[in-house]
Amino acid sequence: MSDFRRDGEATLAWVADYLERVRELPVMSRVKPGQVRESLPAAPPDQGEPFEALLRDLDEKILPGITHWNHPRFLAYFANTGSEPGILAELLAATLNVNAMLWSTSPAATEVEELAVDWLRQLVGLPDGLHGHIEDTASIATISALAAARELRPGGTVLASEQANFSVEKAARLVGLPYRPLPVDDDFRLRPEAVAAEIDGAAAVVATSGTTSSTAVDPTPEIADLCARADVWLHLDAAYAGSAAVCEEFRWALAGAERADSIVINPHKWLFTPMDCSCVWTRRPEAFFHAFSADPEYMPDRDADVTDLKDYGPALGRRFRGLKLWAVLRCYGRAGLQELIREHVRLAQLFASWVEETPGWELVGRHDFSVVCFRREGSDEENQAIVDRVNESGEAFLSGTRLEGRFVLRLAVGNARTTESDIARVWELLREAG
Ligand SMILES: *Cc1c(COP(=O)(O)O)cnc(C)c1O
């Protein structure tokens, strides 16, 4: 154990140093395929090695192959944050190493998970009385929701906007339901009349709050009306924008959520919780239970007084994910979360204003949250070349997407360490590259 303390102190020092110096590292890894693997022994050692050998390789061989998601100028996809309370809570969760498949296999893990998810429910203003739990990703949360919906309408279609995340189509495929993407309006929002035309024969409609390309918010209240009338399951995918609802001024992003049958929000996206943590709530837990409960002989008899979370999702084994979410919500508090979210939105709006007032550049779509889609006048190839040049500089990392058939650049603020000068530097790099 003396080695453990020494290695532990060295590791924690490494973590603290990393968080201090990550800003100086090239954001995007530029290793060639196979380079990291070739730099490491192909076969395991016969005799165990000291942990410090691993820390050495981490610096010399692993870090070059890391794209630094915790870098303040990581602005690609949906930028995220491994926050300090989240990092420490992950260490504690690994130490306890419980498997929270049943309440009885570690009562506190189930109860803290349910409590943390309920705290988040309160923070984003969802109604009381929902059943909530944590899955690893929104992909799995959506698979769970569609499996629950299938219990009520086997064989029905899954409807979603053509801007919905690919995980929705994948989930439909996995639960064996046909998938139909539907058209969007000029702001990339699902058209309710398209839903109305297809609702007969649907098993579920998936509305998105904050689509992955342009962060559009589908008209969930209108879609909820249609679902209620046809008795069709409504799943709200708020993986990204749901976190914004921690601030009252963004509660509109969850309008209609109180009528959804299931809702997913990813704290590992824009709520400073390390990968992986996706919260799912439902007002129809019995449908989830039907889809997922099983009582094999090697499990103790069911205890009617408690919730066994294995009965609400695909996995049996369950990590103590609630601990890191609880840690983040406690250590930031409502005010701390609001401050960061507001700052991210402010930075994105500031960036959008620079794009708007600069000749030769244009905004594409709305930018209600912390993501801005934009492009330089010119061809798709020229715009791709701009983002490639910025990313190769190592100073920042952005991604692109396609909207209305055109390639657009996309700036996503979401790291807790991003400052106004980071955004200003990125704008400088973009203009130089353009
Ligand atoms: C990111 C995202 C997903 C997928 O999330 P995972 O947790 O990576 O599975 C699903 N839907 C939307 C709207 C997203 O933005």
Image: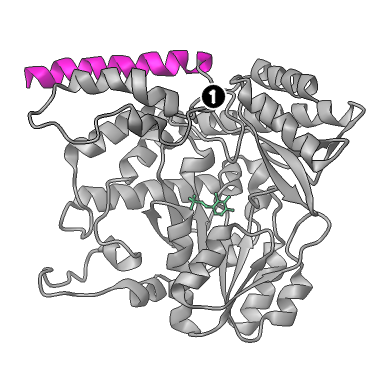
Q: Which residue sits furthest right? A: 359
User: Is residue 104 inside the magenta stretch?
Assistant: no
Q: Secondary structure at mark 1?
A: loop
User: Is residue 9 inside the magenta stretch?
Assistant: yes
Report the front residue among 273 and 163.
163
Which quarter of the picture shows residue 384? top right
| Mark 1 surroundings within 10 Å by alpha-carbon count, few (fewer than 14), some (14 through 19), many (20 or more) | many
For the question of whether residue 58 can be seen, the reply is: yes
Which quarter of the picture shows residue 434? top right
Q: Is residue 46 above or below residue 182?
A: above
| Image coords of residue 389 (percent x, y) | 69, 26
Q: Is residue 83 above or below residue 210?
A: above
Residue at x-position 88% and y-position 35%: 377
| Image coords of residue 429 (percent x, y) | 72, 20
Residue wearing tag 1: 27
| Colour scheme in use | one colour
Magenta residues, start to end? 1-24
Report the front residue among 75 and 101.
75
Q: Is residue 405 left or right of residue 388?
A: right
Which quarter of the picture shows residue 64? top left
Is the CB–ligand 1 distance for label 1 below 8 Å? Answer: no
Prevailing SS of the magenta stretch: helix
| Image coords of residue 96 (percent x, y) | 18, 39
| Image coords of residue 267 (percent x, y) | 47, 43
Mark 1 residue type:
Val
Residue at x-position 53% and y-position 30%: 335
